[in-house]
Image (cartoon, rainbow, N blue to C red):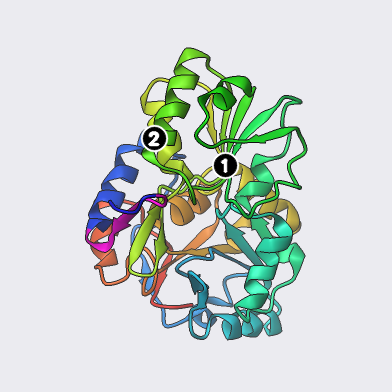
């Protein structure tokens, strides 16, 4: 790991990410899986079986600030074929408006109602207390429906708040994690992890995400840590409600990560497509990870 502010796992530690997810399987949803994943050339091969396509972002539509070639065109083709489109992202560092703007900047044609993020689920039903927010510096927190206090290096701030809302790891580090852990062990309070990912692809590297630090808190025995985003059900509920009238078995989640995109969607009764070329399994043998985990998607594809 390296970096003073953003902790990165280098590409060679892809195995470490997988093993961490596997160690957490008892905390993740249970699901029934296909016996064998069928390899397809593109999503156009399965349009007869699917009425709505739900896309992860990182590793499927974009890598960082760069769109994956052909991704935007494929979404347009699916719309022309009469398919519903949704983007379901665990990115919680920015509000819904900025999330939509990001796809426009990538050149991907997307409507605001087609974008659903874990942040939206995490901020629903917040208790009327002061929430200590772990957030990116550029996040103005204007969509948080409660009083907030941005957390940094002052332990008194951690002790003062009534709950923790973990949105981003952009400026997070081990020192701040230690302060948070000590404060919660002294006085347990609710913690909402707005991004359940352990890690996310950043080019040829992986950044540690809020889910990793949330599970570290659970490892300490803290009982009131709640995770939002794939693979947990709240975000799938939101997507399902937006696709009213479509049978869950005709919805396909397209993602690059077995333990979030694929596991969560199959637990919800959706079909799944593991996208392998650019994200979590870039440069790796995805079939090996499928076999070891037992998380078998409905289909496999290099790019959508």
Residue extending farthest to the top is 186
Report if residue 85 is visible in the image: no
Residue nearer the viewer, 32 or 78: 78
Look at 70% across and 46% down and name the residue there: 141
Residue 114 drawn at (x, y percent)? 71, 65
Residue 59 as seen in the image, left or right of residue 118: left
Look at 27% across and 63% down and name the residue there: 11
Residue 171 as seen in the image, left or right of residue 234: left
Residue 127 as seen in the image, left or right of residue 210: right
Residue nearer the viewer, 4 or 36: 4
Residue 45 drawn at (x, y percent)? 50, 81
Residue 7 drawn at (x, y percent)? 37, 50
Q: Which residues are magenta?
A: 5-12
Which dot marks residue 175?
2
Residue 147 drawn at (x, y percent)? 75, 32
Give the vertical position of 179 relative to 45 (above or below).
above
> What SS does tag 1 mark?
loop
Q: CA distance from mark 1 to mark 2?
A: 24 Å
Give the vertical position of 303 relative to 232 (above or below).
below
Residue nearer the viewer, 31 or 293: 293
Instruction: State which mark lies toward you, 1 or 2.
Output: 2
Residue 8: say if magenta: yes
Residue of label 1? 228
Look at 54% across and 42% down and name the residue there: 232
Report if residue 20 is visible in the image: yes
Look at 66% across and 31% down and name the residue there: 131
């Amino acid at each position: 790991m390296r970096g003073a502010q953003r902790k990165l796992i280098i590409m060679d530690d892809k195995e470490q990410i997988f093993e961490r997810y596997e160690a957490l399987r008892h905390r993740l949803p249970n699901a029934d899986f296909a016996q064998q994943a069928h390899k397809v050339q593109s999503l156009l091969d399965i349009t007869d079986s699917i009425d709505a396509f739900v896309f992860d972002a990182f590793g499927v539509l974009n890598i960082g600030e760069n769109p994956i070639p052909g991704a935007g065109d494929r979404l347009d083709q699916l719309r022309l074929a009469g398919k519903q489109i949704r983007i379901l992202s665990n990115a919680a560092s920015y509000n819904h408006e900025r999330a939509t703007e990001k796809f426009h900047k990538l050149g991907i044609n997307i409507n605001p109602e087609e974008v659903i993020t874990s942040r939206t689920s995490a901020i629903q039903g917040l208790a009327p207390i002061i929430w200590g927010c772990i957030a990116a510096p550029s996040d103005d927190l204007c969509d948080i429906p409660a009083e907030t206090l941005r957390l940094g290096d002052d332990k008194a701030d951690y002790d003062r708040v009534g709950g923790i809302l973990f949105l981003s790891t952009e400026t997070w580090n081990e020192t701040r994690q230690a302060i948070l852990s000590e404060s919660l062990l002294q006085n347990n309070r609710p913690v909402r992890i707005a991004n359940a990912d352990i890690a996310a692809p950043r080019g040829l590297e992986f950044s540690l995400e809020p889910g990793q630090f949330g599970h570290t808190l659970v490892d300490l025995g803290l009982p009131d840590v709640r995770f939002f985003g794939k693979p947990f059900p709240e975000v799938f509920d939101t997507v399902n409600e937006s696709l009213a009238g479509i049978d869950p078995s005709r919805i396909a989640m397209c993602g690059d990560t077995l333990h979030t995109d694929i596991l969560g969607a199959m637990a919800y009764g959706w079909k799944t497509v593991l996208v392998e070329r650019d994200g979590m399994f870039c440069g790796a043998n995805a079939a090996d990870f499928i076999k070891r985990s037992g998380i078998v998607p409905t289909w496999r594809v290099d790019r959508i």
